[in-house]
Amino acid sequence: MELSLEISGDQIAGARDYQEDAFLTTYLDDETGESKSSALIVVADGMGGHAAGNIASNLVVSTFNKTFTGGFGKQDPPGVLRSALKNANEGLKESIEETPGLDGMGCTMVTAALTKGKIYWVSVGDSHIYLIRDRDLSKKNEDHSYGGYLDRMRSQGIDVEAEAGLSRNMLMSAMTGEEIAEVDCPNSGYQLLPGDRLIIASDGLDTLDTETILKTSAWSHTPKECVAGLLKAVEDAKRPRQDNTTIVAVDVVERQPAEGKAAAPQAPAVAVAPARKELARERDLPVTPSGGSKGLIIALILLLAVGAGGGYVYMTGMWRDWMPKDQAGTQPEPKPEAKPEPKP
């Protein structure tokens, strides 16, 4: 069973006057424009003010994407994810050292690498990877906010009291060019199934509860409709301090067998060969309707040629127009499909 990925993404500024989120989706095996079975999705949520936050998120997204695509296929996906994370974080450090005015900038980041029917990820911060399967929503990556920390401790049976003055939204880990406190990058991938829908999003999606996300997804037939519906639901909530929100939706579908697509260029040969074989069999038969009709037409033409009118027909060559014509033809070669470009 081969899986194919349908991807769509978009973002809104929310109640902010500026956009600090950045995202990028890239098909990793799209040389022919047909496969789309491997992809990289990077979402970064900048912090540090208008200019600095935007610079941080875009720098991390571009550096991560360049490193991962360059190393894809050369080692296991988790290894490439960790290398790309390291390079992206070092890129932040170098930028801050070169431009002291950028000191304090940083971002959270969540990245999903989908290949060979599995999803691998690396995340730092409080952005999300959600899986919708059988009308159930589950979060796959860790939440590196203070609230996420408390929830993880309680799920492990450890009763931790929240410290006074600490908000659940407070970040426990982020990319700032310094050592990263917490990184979530499992050593093995999670198996995907046809019909799965993935939602990769910044924490602006926290405005919506689980039920709203599930309902909106259920009403959406495509990833594009899902993204549009979720962003509209966030806007309709009208939160006074609504954060930037970025959402990328991925539908996992079963791809048609490869032989079905490969057969198209061979259509001319397949169409002609059976006709020729059929004619060969007919010539071996003593009597056939097709051969008899052809002989009768020739005989009539010769008889007409003896008469005056027939002689004219024969001499002018009009008899050729009465001969049955071969119906076998060669279809034109199909034009190759245009290679889709990754959406910035």
Image: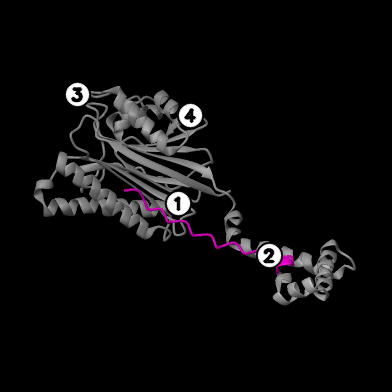
Q: Which residue is mark 4?
A: 136
Q: Position of residue 258 (x, y in %)?
A: 58, 55
Instruction: Give the vertical position of 223 relative to 160 (above or below).
Output: below
Please provide the residue range marked out in magenta: 321-344
Q: In front: mark 2 or mark 3?
A: 2
Q: Earlier in the sequence, mark 4 or mark 2?
A: 4
Q: In front: mark 3 or mark 4?
A: 4
- Few, some or many C-alpha atoms within 10 Å of disc 4 (few <14, some 14-19, many ≥20)? few
Cβ atoms under marks 2 and 3 closer than 8 Å: no
Secondary structure under the numbered disc 3 in the rendered image: loop
Magenta-span inclusion, residue 327: yes
Secondary structure under the numbered disc 4 in the rendered image: strand
Q: Which residue is mark 2?
A: 272
Nearer to the camera, 36 or 266: 266
- Few, some or many C-alpha atoms within 10 Å of disc 3 (few <14, some 14-19, many ≥20)? few
Q: Position of residue 220 (x, y in %)?
A: 45, 32
Q: In front: mark 4 or mark 2?
A: 2
- Few, some or many C-alpha atoms within 10 Å of disc 2 (few <14, some 14-19, many ≥20)? some
Cβ atoms under marks 1 and 2 closer than 8 Å: no
How much space separates mark 2 and mark 3, taking CA atoms?
80 Å
Q: Which residue is mark 1?
A: 38
Q: Position of residue 14 (x, y in %)?
A: 25, 31
Q: Which residue is mark 3?
A: 165
Answer with left or right where residue 170 lies relative to residue 322: left
Mark 3: amino acid: Gly
Mark 2: amino acid: Val
Magenta-span inclusion, residue 148: no
Q: Earlier in the sequence, mark 2 or mark 3?
A: 3
User: Residue drawn 47% across and 34% down?
Assistant: 221
